[in-house]
Each structure stands twice: as C-alpha cells, then as structure tokens.
Image: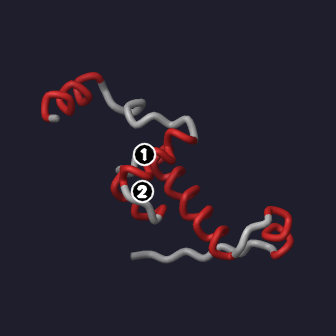
Amino acid sequence: MCQVSVSIPNEVLYDTNMSVADATAFARQMVALGYYTQNKVSIGYCAGIAGMSEADFIRFLGSHDVGIFDRMTEDALKRDIANA
C-alpha cells in the first residue's frame, strides 16, 4: 500500500475551520472522488481510500452529482440488473 503526504498551511485549516482530522478526511474523500471519476477505479477501492463503506461512498458520490451508472454501458447495466 502506498502512503501519500500532503502539506496544508495552517492558515487554510484556520480559514476553513478544519481540524487536522477533518482535513485528512477531506483529502482522502477528494482523492477517492478523483480516482473514481477520472481513473475508473472501482467503488470498493475508492470507498476504502475515502475511509467509508461502499454505501456511504455511493451517497458521497451522489452528493457530488456523480451517478454510479453514468460510466456503465447499457449492456453492463442490463447484466447487473439481471444478476440482482
């Protein structure tokens, strides 16, 4: 597993009223969102990066106007529905 470090100025934390824990959670969520939307990484992996359950990550995607079916082809969606 890879670990990445990000430096955030204290002034940003102050201005946003974020604790270090809040900023860490925010960074993890935004990285996961980017991986999901730009690199087509699975919901499961992205949920893990974000520190969320898959259900919570799906809700998080929705809160950022990202649909989980947007990237699916019609055939893949039909297969998922048939297997549900």
Horizontal relation, residue 7 to residue 34: left or right: right
Q: CA distance from mark 2 to mark 1?
A: 10 Å
Mark 1 secondary-structure assignment: helix
Q: Position of residue 10 (x, y in %)?
A: 82, 76
Residue mark closest to the camera, 2 vs 1: 1
Q: Is 9 situated above or below 49?
A: below
Q: Secondary structure at mark 2?
A: helix
Task: Give residue 39's mark.
Answer: none
Q: Quadrant of the C terminus?
A: top left
- The quadrant in which the N terminus is found is bottom left
Comes first in the chain, label 2 or label 1: 2
Q: Are marks 2 and 1 in contact (CB under 8 Å)?
A: no
The location of residue 3, given as percent across then percent down, is 49, 77
Task: Give the residue displayed 56% in from the left and 41% down from the top.
Answer: 63
The three-letter code of the residue at mark 1 reads Ile
Q: Kindly identify which residue carries mark 1.
A: 58
Residue 42's spot in the image, x, y percent? 35, 50
Depth check: give the residue in front, 59 or 77: 59
Q: Say above or below: 30 vs 22.
A: above
Residue neighbourhood size for the residue with mark 1, other residues' Cα within 10 Å, grouped as few (<14), some (14–19), many (≥20): some
Q: Is residue 24 left or right of residue 2?
A: right
Label of residue 46 in the image: 2
Q: Nearer the viewer, residue 26 or 33?
A: 26
Count how many numbered circles sit on residues in the image.
Answer: 2
At a point 45% along the width and 48% down the height, the residue shown is: 36
What residue is rendered at 33% in x and 31% in y?
72
Task: Count residues near mark 2 (Cα–Cα under 10 Å), then give few for <14, some for 14-19, many for 20+.
Answer: many
